[in-house]
């Protein structure tokens, strides 16, 4: 039996991601946002289901499509908006933008635009966490999130092989939206059997094919507990999902003719935000919507009022000190 508190909590997280990104899509044409944006509208239940069972000191790693996990892992919303606006108060000093969000105080590793590259970095982090646990006694868990396209990179297989060999405390999560930009899975893979392929490396695999936020959360809760308490990693989770908007940018691109409108309408039926709202009473939904609106407005005001980085800051954070 699901508690109303849990439903409200997950609903709020997903709604915050959706409304934040839809607001970005509105603002984007004004040039306030200084970098390309890869939106996760329609995919929110994965970030929320995946991040909810993580402790603050657990680690999340993601790709350029990183707004959702940044928010779901508890990243600072005002610093996120300021980063998108290219402002000094941004989470990367305003010098990185949407594709490189980072918040180490909440265990959010810096993201990268180069497909696949964050997977070995997250794997290395898991090795560090495994070594650290020998002295601290606490096993922190690392989660590496990437798209189906990321699994086509050689470094994905090198990384999962190493993780399996060293039994690392890492959960690999593939957000399978079946698209790499405009190319569907059917034109890229002879067989749609990702979990089977990964299992041959000696890795436990799980697949959730309907984006159900509770199933994702439950699978992750068990995986995190298992790794936290001495279970041998890695673990692989494939989550089917659907990207509602274009690959990069704020537009709905269903008129571009590379994917079917029916598929989109099918996935819209599964929208977890609508589903969870229907499980709550009207007052709770309204309260959460108001809170979300206020948080986004505060983030926008913070970003708008913040200064741009100075010219001298071009020379900071270039080399490790
Ligand atoms: C190494 C590399 N190759 C190609 C690209 C161009 N590129 C950017 S995004 C993308 C598609 C990746 O799709 P997927 O990993 O499934 O993630 P999604 O965008 O669907 O979230 C490609 C090919 C890149 N950025 N890096």
Image (cartoon, rainbow, N blue to C red):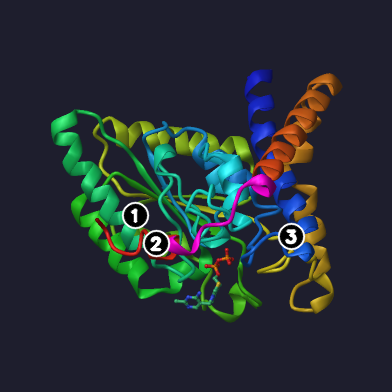
The residue under the point 28% across, 50% down is: 125
Which residue in the structure is indicated by mark 1?
122
Q: Name the residue under label 3.
A: 244
Q: Say if the magenta span includes residue 79.
A: no
Coordinates of residue 14 in the picture (x, y in percent): 67, 40
The residue that label 2 is drawn on is 118
Q: Where is residue 71 in the image (x, y as percent from the top left)?
A: 57, 42
Badge 2 local density, few (<14 within 10 Å), some, or many (20+)?
many
Q: Does the residue labelled 1 lie within 8 Å of ligand 1?
A: no
Magenta stretch in the rendered image: 303-312
Residue 7 in picture, x, y percent from top left:
67, 26
Q: Is residue 260 among the parts visible in the rendering?
A: yes
**Labelled disc at residue 132:** none
Q: In which quarter of the image is residue 142?
A: top left
Viewer-nearest of labels 2 and 3? 2
Mark 2 and mark 3: span between their CA atoms? Answer: 24 Å
Tag 2–tag 1 contact (CB < 8 Å): yes
Residue toward you, 300 or 125? 300
């Amino acid at each position: 039996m699901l508690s109303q508190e849990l439903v409200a909590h997950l609903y709020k997280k997903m709604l915050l991601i959706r409304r934040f990104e839809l607001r970005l899509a509105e603002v984007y044409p004004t040039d306030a946002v200084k970098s390309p944006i890869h939106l996760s509208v329609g995919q929110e239940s994965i970030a929320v289901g995946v991040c909810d069972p993580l402790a603050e000191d657990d680690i999340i790693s993601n790709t350029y499509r990183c707004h959702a996990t940044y928010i779901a892992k508890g990243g600072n919303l005002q610093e996120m908006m300021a980063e998108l606006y290219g402002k000094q108060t941004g989470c990367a000093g305003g010098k990185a933008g949407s594709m490189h969000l980072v918040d180490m105080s909440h265990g959010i590793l810096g993201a990268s635009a180069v497909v696949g590259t964050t997977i070995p970095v997250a794997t290395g982090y898991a090795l560090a966490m495994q070594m650290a646990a020998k002295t601290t006694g606490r096993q922190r868990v690392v989660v590496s999130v990437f798209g189906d396209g990321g699994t086509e990179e050689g470094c994905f297989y090198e990384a999962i092989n190493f993780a399996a060999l060293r039994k690392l405390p890492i959960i690999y999560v593939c957000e399978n939206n079946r698209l790499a930009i405009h190319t569907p899975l059917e034109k890229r893979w002879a067989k749609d059997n990702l979990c089977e392929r990964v299992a041959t490396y000696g890795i436990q695999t799980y697949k959730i094919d309907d984006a159900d936020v509770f199933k994702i959360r439950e699978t992750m809760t068990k995986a995190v507990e298992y790794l936290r308490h001495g279970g041998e990693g890695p673990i692989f989770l494939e989550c089917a999902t659907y990207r509602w908007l274009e690959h990069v940018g704020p537009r709905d691109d269903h008129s571009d003719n590379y994917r079917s409108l029916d598929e989109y309408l099918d996935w819209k039926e599964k929208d977890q935000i609508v589903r969870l709202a229907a499980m709550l009473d009207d007052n709770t939904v309204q309260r959460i919507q108001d809170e979300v609106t206020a948080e986004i407005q505060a983030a926008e005001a913070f970003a708008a009022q913040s200064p741009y980085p100075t010219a001298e800051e071009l020379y900071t954070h270039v080399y490790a000190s």
